[in-house]
Image (cartoon, coloured by chain):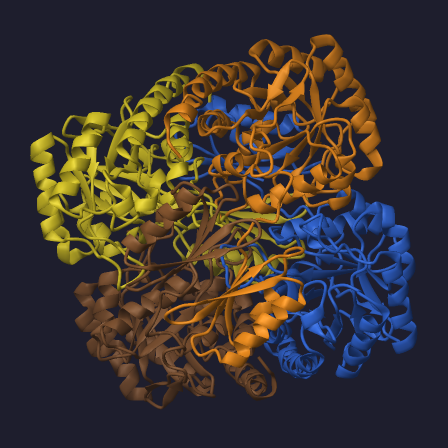
Chain colours: A blue, B orange, C yellow, D brown
Amino acid sequence: MLIVMRQDASREQIDAVIRAIEEKGCSARPIPGGERVSIGVLYNTGPIDPAVFQGMQGVKEAIPVTRPYKLVSREVKPHDSVIRVGNASIGKDRLVIIGGPCAVESESQAMNTAERVKKAGADIFRGGAFKPRTSPYAFQGMGEAGLRILARVRETFDLPVVTEVLDLEHFDMVEKYADIVQIGTRNMQNFSLLRRAGEAKKPILLKRGMSATVEEWLMAAEYILSEGNSEIILCERGLRTFVRHSRNTLDFSAIPVVRKESHLPVIVDPSHAAGLRDQVLPLSRAAAAVGAHGLMVEVHSAPDSALCDGGQSLYPDQFEVLCNQTRAIQEISRQNDKITRG
Amino acid sequence: MLIVMRQDASREQIDAVIRAIEEKGCSARPIPGGERVSIGVLYNTGPIDPAVFQGMQGVKEAIPVTRPYKLVSREVKPHDSVIRVGNASIGKDRLVIIGGPCAVESESQAMNTAERVKKAGADIFRGGAFKPRTSPYAFQGMGEAGLRILARVRETFDLPVVTEVLDLEHFDMVEKYADIVQIGTRNMQNFSLLRRAGEAKKPILLKRGMSATVEEWLMAAEYILSEGNSEIILCERGLRTFVRHSRNTLDFSAIPVVRKESHLPVIVDPSHAAGLRDQVLPLSRAAAAVGAHGLMVEVHSAPDSALCDGGQSLYPDQFEVLCNQTRAIQEISRQNDKITRG
Amino acid sequence: MLIVMRQDASREQIDAVIRAIEEKGCSARPIPGGERVSIGVLYNTGPIDPAVFQGMQGVKEAIPVTRPYKLVSREVKPHDSVIRVGNASIGKDRLVIIGGPCAVESESQAMNTAERVKKAGADIFRGGAFKPRTSPYAFQGMGEAGLRILARVRETFDLPVVTEVLDLEHFDMVEKYADIVQIGTRNMQNFSLLRRAGEAKKPILLKRGMSATVEEWLMAAEYILSEGNSEIILCERGLRTFVRHSRNTLDFSAIPVVRKESHLPVIVDPSHAAGLRDQVLPLSRAAAAVGAHGLMVEVHSAPDSALCDGGQSLYPDQFEVLCNQTRAIQEISRQNDKITRG
Amino acid sequence: MLIVMRQDASREQIDAVIRAIEEKGCSARPIPGGERVSIGVLYNTGPIDPAVFQGMQGVKEAIPVTRPYKLVSREVKPHDSVIRVGNASIGKDRLVIIGGPCAVESESQAMNTAERVKKAGADIFRGGAFKPRTSPYAFQGMGEAGLRILARVRETFDLPVVTEVLDLEHFDMVEKYADIVQIGTRNMQNFSLLRRAGEAKKPILLKRGMSATVEEWLMAAEYILSEGNSEIILCERGLRTFVRHSRNTLDFSAIPVVRKESHLPVIVDPSHAAGLRDQVLPLSRAAAAVGAHGLMVEVHSAPDSALCDGGQSLYPDQFEVLCNQTRAIQEISRQNDKITRG
């Protein structure tokens, strides 16, 4: 942390700040300048809240400097983490594509859709058995019956499945059936759930909160890693902004930033961000181009009769175009890793 | 819902939309206009996702019209709900003030602070025993030991206590000790927790998510109400915006909006929104002036040595000024209910 | 500025950064720490773009530290600036209230409204002669005819008038008629207009841009001050956020921040922020409570027939309530300057 | 517009709303529903402010339905507009790339950079002669001397040039030298400048305001079109959000939305959005993938010594990679126009 003193700060005020720093178990390094004094704070134990100093006499500002995350950091582990699920490797060269309906609605719906997405080129099947819904009166998912259908999809089509867990109560059950356990955007800072995910034997797909900073998102992953599970796939799904022509605004610059800061793989969910079918294909191409390791896309064999999010689900033939275009774009895009200098 | 067709929409496209509406179990009311046709959708069963129609040929836009909430709505219950806790009535004329530290750190810290806030004029004591922390390495609260200290505060000072519950696992425990159970901003859409809160025998203080719309917030309250608990206190705590001079931006216009839309009482937490002590008093006055039913403020007997959020905690004598100023302002402000026309 | 090096930064990379700093005419102060080296940059001439360093090998982050503004800063001029217009003093103890219609529509509309706002307690009259409109097809204001009506309002009711200038072309004309020249939110960074305002002989009311930081806002004021005009009134008018229940979200925490950072007076416009009449009175009270030096409120003698913004204009009798409540609240609020410690 | 009445609205209140609609010169179409009455408003003359009705007794909400823009709309002109400048056609199949420094600093800097960007594959050269700067003390551009250098670039390298105009005062001068006149993000709602641009004989590059909706942006273009200039290139440059890892957040979903709503071509500026060199190449690829007609990228022959925005400027060899990758990606991306259904 750096503490910037006011121009008119007195010697006593500066000394009081230095004492306060040392009382917190840290070291103070005053940096005299032309106009004012600044004081560098070295953490001997752990980070401190800047607001503690901002309230002190003579202090103009207290600015955090170092990152709070450790295990997720590329400084700690320089090489890319690769998560292997079935035949797919998330975090390596090939773009991994996850497709399937918002919610599992019936065995026939799931099987029909799975057949189509498999044929179109998907690596992994998605489908919700427990659905987070803004309204208590909306369809909440099929529960364990839905999970059993997902298991049948895996057996029939040799497709790993990813599905969301909403709470501690159902974690064991979801972990039993799923190949990847998803933690949704509303649960990104559900810390009990994160800790439980850290004890899971399955990889975790961790969506970014819709108003989370990249730092908070990586700290959420740090919760999981700190409990021992290092198989984490990050998933960008759009921010809440003032924009009204799409449901959320995808933060594409987060992809290169996460790849620079962390060794964990990062994918993009364009379907929930868009909220509208028309935008899903262009945004998927953009995600492949910007350097995401994968995509998670909603596809439905009959979107018009979907119980949930039908308006943003692709038709299977649109999804096939998507797989082809995005894989071709990713081929072109990843070449740059060798040719550009940092 | 209203579906607006494109100017060049064909008769067939319009008919297809009408059929789709009727297949969803709703009624369609075409409204011919000068430039284009619009179609009103009447919900015979429940609301439908606008995105379903936005993907259809000839459709320009589908606009939701009615509100999705029921039990929280003032249309359903016209009169203000009043929550009684100890001697305090939240939702009536008198401004209710909740004060106390971010976290319970020790018995002496809690008792010293409670004595001061009681004397300054607080109605209710706050203090966290389970703390949601961005970092897994930060102080996470004292747990049940903290709850026991809160119980002693209540007995000693005749102050009801409010404290946060983080997960289902500890709900019974928190409910046993607390007079009001708080659900924090990160858990506003933790639906399992909301349902459990709906079965609680204690009032729930429901903070607004930091990027939640008022509608989503009221729908979260609807989850609680729909399970049978109607004792809910809403709490505005600031939005995440681009602003950097405070931690969050309080949405003061939400107060009159919530009071118009819902019968539930609504209070303001200026401490977390500000993140800096200097802003807490002015923002508290503004909250009283805008019509909030109460305030929740962080106070610490020795902020400089606080384990959590010390930089935003008031000194006890500042809190006394706050109680006096805000109660005087609220006296002036509530007179307008009689004199202005809607 | 502070440059934070990566943990694995080499000696050569650190030296290269130091050289780059010195080549820019600044001094470098390395601060060795436990985990990594940071380098303080002292500006010998003027500030530098942090991005220049962020691209260098071994650099983790470059963080600006000092504020870029000078003349607007309270560090340069510790005492409050007070702007005197007619009998009003903006920046002193008494809350200054500006009232009037969005646009001057006719002599009778302006005179009727002026009579009512004067009687209700307004200090200054507002009314637009040149209107910034999103659509080229909307009413654009009466132009010079409107300015002449404003002059008649001043003469008849002894009320100073404030009105907006949209461009350089009409600045002389507006300056001739107005007592205060307003620069609107869309022009906050119209730098030619700011420079011209700096040469004006009249005070300038500078609205904050709807997505401007406080720093950018103060830098816009710095443009005016740097040309010689120190009579500036800042006006907060709401930010663009994701919120839909009001047109914009007022940033109330900006008021104490501006008062701390700058000597310039700051007022609040609740009408444009709300966009709805219902919210204007509560938000005005909040503005008085948070410490604003004044208010600018839209009032119309017959809002239902207004050509512009009628839905957010108060009826004259509502405005009278507003004047009384806000002045009483401000009386209570300003007492705190003496009793709280910083 | 649609006016939604409260459930308990009386017959008299409904009739009053209908009368108010008719007094504004519009037609009212009541739509009786199950729970409440809604009233469709047909504009016989022009649109009305919804807030006028929101204040009336018994009204729950007033919702605008139709779009306010006309000449920019694809409903009015179904086919893509193509802007021809030199050998480039903006709005057709081939991705148009604009490259060059933030500011013209000297003849040698401009000529060196132009030679490199031309060779790398740029179609158009960019360079600022008048710079909008947050601080009055920062480098403001070379003015007419800079424009003369741009003219020499065009002659020497057969590259059309685009440069920004800041105010009415210098419009004639900029128009004389430039092939495309740029209106910057801060001037998107400088209506006098937009009207002047509407009389220009040169194409206009209109950047989106950093907190403008797509609707406001298209309305700004409508100002230009309504004065007679239909040669407009829209440019997305990022929104102001809470994100701190890039300067702004590019709104990629705006590209398909603008292409659907309007016939005007739309390009992306990744350099200002990113603010950091590392992000420019990935974001450029994403822009090509999402369907932008072109890119505007900052390139400098020696970024480390740039007077302005050096940290976000590409090295010439990075720009060459960018041209190659983005053109290959756009080839793949535009194939979808034929194969996907709407």
- Residue C56: x, y in percent? 54, 62
Image quadrant occupied by the C terminus of chain D: bottom right
Q: Is residue C84 visible?
A: no
Q: Is residue A294 left or right of residue D238?
A: right
Q: Residue at x 30, y 39 (%)?
A: C234
- Please, is residue A40 above or below residue C330 in the view? below
- Please, is residue A55 above or below residue A205 in the view? above
Q: Depth check: B72 or D42 in front?
A: D42
- Please, is residue A307 above or below residue A133 in the view? below
Q: Depth check: A185 or A267 in front?
A: A185
Q: Depth check: B111 or A315 in front?
A: A315
- Residue A220: x, y in percent? 72, 49
| Residue with the most extreme front position | D11
Count of labels in the image: 0
Q: Residue at x 57, y 20 (%)?
A: B96
Q: Residue at x 71, y 79 (%)?
A: A316
Q: Is residue A298 left or right of residue C4?
A: right
- Residue B223: x, y in percent? 70, 42
Image quadrant occupied by the N terminus of chain D: bottom left
Q: Quadrant of residue C166?
A: bottom left
Q: Depth check: C114 or D189 in front?
A: C114
- Residue C96: x, y in percent? 26, 28
- Please, is residue D329 above or below residue D211 in the view? below
Q: Is residue A205 visible?
A: yes
Q: Is residue C274 left or right of residue A146?
A: left
